[in-house]
Image (tube, rainbow, N blue to C red):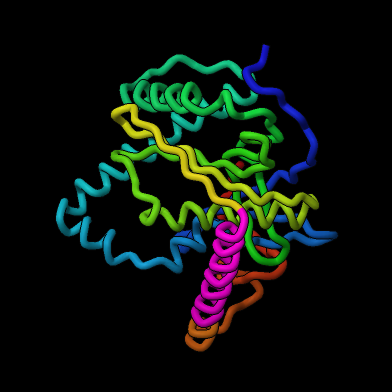
Amino acid sequence: MQLVPIRRKYKYQKLDRIDFETGRKYVVEEGESSIALPSVTTILDGTKDKSFLQAWEQKVGQEAAERIRNDAATVGTHMHNVVERLLLNRPLDPPRTWLQVKGYRMGYTLVEAFFQDVQEVWGSEVPLYYPQRYAGTTDFGGVYKGHPSILDFKQTNRMKKREWIEDYFLQLAAYAMAHNKVHGTAIDYGVILMVAQNGEVQEFTTCGREFQSYQDTWMRRVAEYEKKRAADKAALEAVEPLGEERTDLDGGELFLPGGPHVVD
């Protein structure tokens, strides 16, 4: 018996992922050609104010900051693994490290707190793209509390205030817009489900005019990113004109002879 009904309503295109030093791109098949589109997280990272993060790194030290980031990423991966496998009714391997134990515990805490309100799963780790602009993978598409929704699952060291997490809402807006554009939906509800390492949980939702405002802000961030990348490309070509081999600065058809390694 499944905890939540799975409804395969939409056909999601599998997207190959390419990681560059400058960020992540996804390869999208559009007609007879392929195009490499920047990821949602790469766009957000490339257009946000990093002064607070830089101040934190200076305070704790670069080595400690790197360790904290790596541990958080590992715990988050295992937390997402629990949630994804429970959503899709798949078996879960036993934990083999203490960070994995922590991630599993946080994942089960999130599921217990919120998943009775999940009525329908369209997909978990859903690949999405907005034609010609961006692509990415959302944690969840389906029905939550009666609303067609995009959900994002977050782990944190401490509870967050709503005003601290605008970029999380912009992620939801980006994925909702992509889903609506490609699959003809009208998703107008975004949810952030968050669990802290001490077991506390939080739910943040956005809809209606507020969600539309986040969508407008998101598209401005996309335009800002595209402008920056175009300027970077022009500066690079001014120093050394590009040959036949394309670089990650390109935004058109993907030509990567012997290029970066593509992973699933």
Residue in front for this viewpoint, 56 or 25: 56
Quarter containing the N terminus: top right
Q: Residue at x 46, y 39 (%)?
A: 203
Q: Residue furthest front?
A: 209
Q: Residue furthest right?
A: 32
Q: Residue at x 67, y 28 (%)?
A: 119
User: For residue 214: magenta?
Assistant: yes
Q: Is residue 85 visible?
A: no
- Relative to 159, is 17 on the left or the right? right
Q: Residue at x 29, y 39 (%)?
A: 157
Residue in front for this viewpoint, 31 or 171: 171
Q: Position of residue 186 (x, y in %)?
A: 74, 51
Q: Residue furthest top?
A: 1
Q: Residue at x 70, y 23 (%)?
A: 5
The answer to whether 74 is drawn above or below residue 165 in the figure is above
Count of numbered labels shown in the rendering: 0
- Relative to 79, is 171 on the left or the right? right
User: For residue 41: magenta?
Assistant: no
Q: Position of residue 113 (x, y in %)?
A: 47, 25
Q: Which residues are magenta?
A: 208-232
The answer to whether 77 is drawn above or below residue 61 in the figure is above
Tell me which corner region of the image, top left, top right, bottom left or bottom right, holds residue 85: top right
Q: Is residue 150 visible?
A: yes
- Relative to 259, is 22 on the left or the right? left
